[in-house]
Amino acid sequence: MWTVKEQCQLHDEILKDRIHHLMPRLMKECGVEMWVVLSREYNEDPLFYTMAPALVKNAGRTTCFVFCLGKDGKYEAINMSRPNPRFDGFYTQGMHRKDDVFQALNRLIQEKKPERVHVDVAHACAMADGLSKNLYEHLVLATNGGVKFVSAEDIAVRWIETRTQRELELYPAIYKPMMDIIDQVFSADFITPGVTTTTDIEWAVSQKVNDLGLECWFSPDVDLQRQGGTDFRMFDEVIREGDVVHCDVGLVCLGLRTDTQRNVYIGKKGETAIPEGISRAYETGCRFQDIVRESFIAGRTGNQIFEAALSQAKKEGIEAMSYCHPIGVFGHSAGPCVGMFDNQGFVPGHGEYRLHDDTCYALELNVSVPVPEWGGQKVCMMMEETISFTGGATHFMDDKRKILRFVPAKG
């Protein structure tokens, strides 16, 4: 694992590449001449954190980033707020310390004369809706109502969802620490049937992530299913022999998030392998993962991917649900969602975003399969892997996704 200094250096290396190379490409793609991102200290636009160096933790009073792409192709990334040496190398300085941010911004707009100025107001994407009413009113007042402000939602989504080659190279290494932690807690060394609870595992995961100097972006969920159980997600339960234990975990590293669900079968005395019915349920889940991945075609909307995947699953007799979501700098990130847990149909807004190359997703889904060994009771096999979509195909971050863990009985 990287030291804090190494993490900051990698974060800033990635950010410089994004600002200087990715941003102008996206501006051209989205037809944006000027994009203004305004933040107030302790009420930051969510995008502030995707545009600030590692050691800049908050906006300083009012912080303003401006990205300009002239008709002549000249690109500039400008800090239109008080000077901060930590911005050097990322942004050119556009105003003096004693200037007013909004007056300086108005001068820049008058100089560049863009036909439209894009700002962070959005209908569907929450992360692109970070411009406060107060700042917007100051902006309109400073420009005397003479500027056409429009939504930056399109470019904001593309900025949030797009991963650079360096990020894609590093993502598997970011994924690995949580996989190692799951290996540790989903084992006979940690789980003692009749003693260990699902909550014990939740706290253990949280502690192990903290010990690495990292953090979980949501509290770990550990639950179980058992023969004769009343729910497919039983929380705060003592783990027994014959249970299927499931976890949903994710961490943050280098500004990127992971999201994973894994399962383990707790063996009964005399069992040396997972019962065939439960193994079949897991393999059915793996098959549905492949169906969903095969439905990922660039240019399709999330709704189109969902429809194609569920249609194929139905043809194959698989009872399935898909609720895949984009992931990256946010856990439930910007881009096309492929179904939602509480909406297994057309999803307005998020479901209408289109799939682009160099993006990442949580391949999150489940299948329900009758298990003969459980008297025909269905096991809901919940699965999730962080994947990338690059070169027109999906790629797993981890090569262990086809392993259903087995913890043998003790004694």
Image (cartoon, helix red, strand yellow):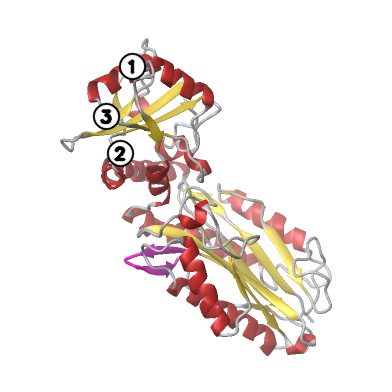
Displayed quadrant of residue 115: top left
Query: Label 2 is placed on what type of residue?
Result: Val
Alpha carbon separation for disc pair 3 and 2: 9 Å
Q: Tell me: 202 left or right of 162.
A: right
Kindly check if marks 2 and 1 are in contact, taking CB atoms under 8 A apart as contact: no
- Does residue 238 appear in the picture of this structure? yes
Check disc 1 and report its element: helix, strand or loop: helix
Q: Is residue 96 above or below residue 128?
A: above
Query: What is the quadrant of the C terminus in the image?
Result: bottom right
Residue 23 horizontal side relative to residue 325, left or right: left
Q: Give the percent coordinates (x, y) of residue 387.
A: 46, 64
Q: Earlier in the sequence, mark 3 or mark 1?
A: 1
Task: Magenta stretch: give its range.
Answer: 386-396
Picture residue at 36% right of the left edge, 62% below the top:
299
Q: Position of residue 286 (x, y in %)?
A: 55, 78
**Residue 400 in view in this figure:** no
Towards the viewer: 66 or 165: 66
Which residue in the protein does label 3 denote?
A: 114
Tag 1 or tag 2, which sits nearer the N-term?
2
Q: Where does label 2 land, which residue?
A: 32
Of the numbered discs 3 and 2, the one sitting upstream in the chain is 2
Q: Residue at label 1? A: 104
Is 395 part of what is drawn in magenta? yes
Residue type at mark 3: give it.
Pro
Badge nearest the viewer, 3 or 1 = 3
**Secondary structure found at label 2:** loop
Residue 183 lies in quadrant: bottom right
Disc 3 to disc 2: CB gap under 8 Å: no
Amino acid tagged 1: Ala
| 409 shown above or below 190 | below
Tell me the number on the disc at residue 38: none
